[in-house]
Amino acid sequence: MIQQIPKRLSVPLCLCVNLLLFVFINQPVASATDTVSYEGTWHTINRKLDGTMTCIVTRLGEERWEGRFFGVWQGISFDYTVPFTGSPSDLHGTANIDGADYQWTGKFASGSPGSFKGTFGGTRYNGDFDLKETPRTAIKPKAFGQ
């Protein structure tokens, strides 16, 4: 025998179900534009350490970002994840990399391809980077355990 829901409960029950569906359907979903890959060069001005790198930038929220900078320099792999803040035209952040403190500023520029440019300075090196947006297929996942 199937038990029927009393009529006095059916309206509130329907409202609850509709409310839950509305909440779940309208949850923000990360889109492809929340993560962008850039590749290019970085240069140091106080000691010649130039190289190429990739940066995968993820938008974390309103004026909050995270960049994963990685590449190979003189046969040694590097891979650093750095949080930063600001509008796309006025980015800034700090990082401690291999025991050295750095401050940097930068900006994203739209176009085809887009770009990510910045300058950095710190207790060890000073310089700049100039990166261009790459196709999403160029993104390589971080290896487990790194």
Image (tube, rainbow, N blue to C red):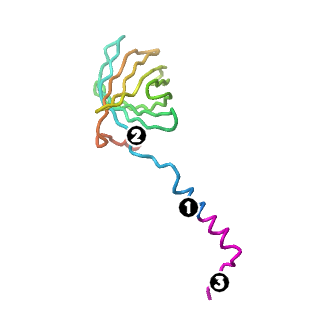
In the rendered image, residue 130, in percent from the top left (x then y), is placed at 33, 23
Quarter of the view holding residue 14: bottom right
Whether residue 11 is in magenta: the answer is yes
Alpha-carbon span between mark 3 and mark 2: 50 Å
Could you say whether the residue bearing mark 1 is in a helix, strand or loop? Answer: helix
Residue 105 as seen in the image, left or right of residue 73: right
The reply to whether callout 3 and callout 2 are in contact (CB within 8 Å) is: no
Alpha-carbon span between mark 1 and mark 3: 24 Å
Read off the residue under disc 3: 3
In this view, which residue lies farthest toward the bottom?
A: 1
- The first of marks 1 and 3 along the sequence is 3
In the rendered image, residue 134, in percent from the top left (x then y), is placed at 29, 36
Amino acid type for the residue under numbered disc 1: Leu
Amino acid type for the residue under numbered disc 2: Thr
Quarter of the view holding residue 80: top left
The residue stretch that appears in magenta: 1-17
Quarter that holds the C terminus: top left
| Disc number lying in front (1 or 2) | 1
Could you say whether the residue bearing mark 2 is in a helix, strand or loop? Answer: strand
* Residue drawn 32% across the image and 41% down it: 140
Tag 3: Cα neighbours inside 10 Å, few (<14), some, or many (≥20)?
Answer: few
| Disc number lying in front (3 or 2) | 3
Quarter of the view holding residue 11: bottom right
Read off the residue under disc 1: 21
* Residue drawn 51% across the image and 57% down it: 25
- The first of marks 1 and 2 along the sequence is 1
Alpha-carbon span between mark 1 and mark 2: 27 Å
Using the image, tell me which numbered label, if any, was put on residue 70.
none
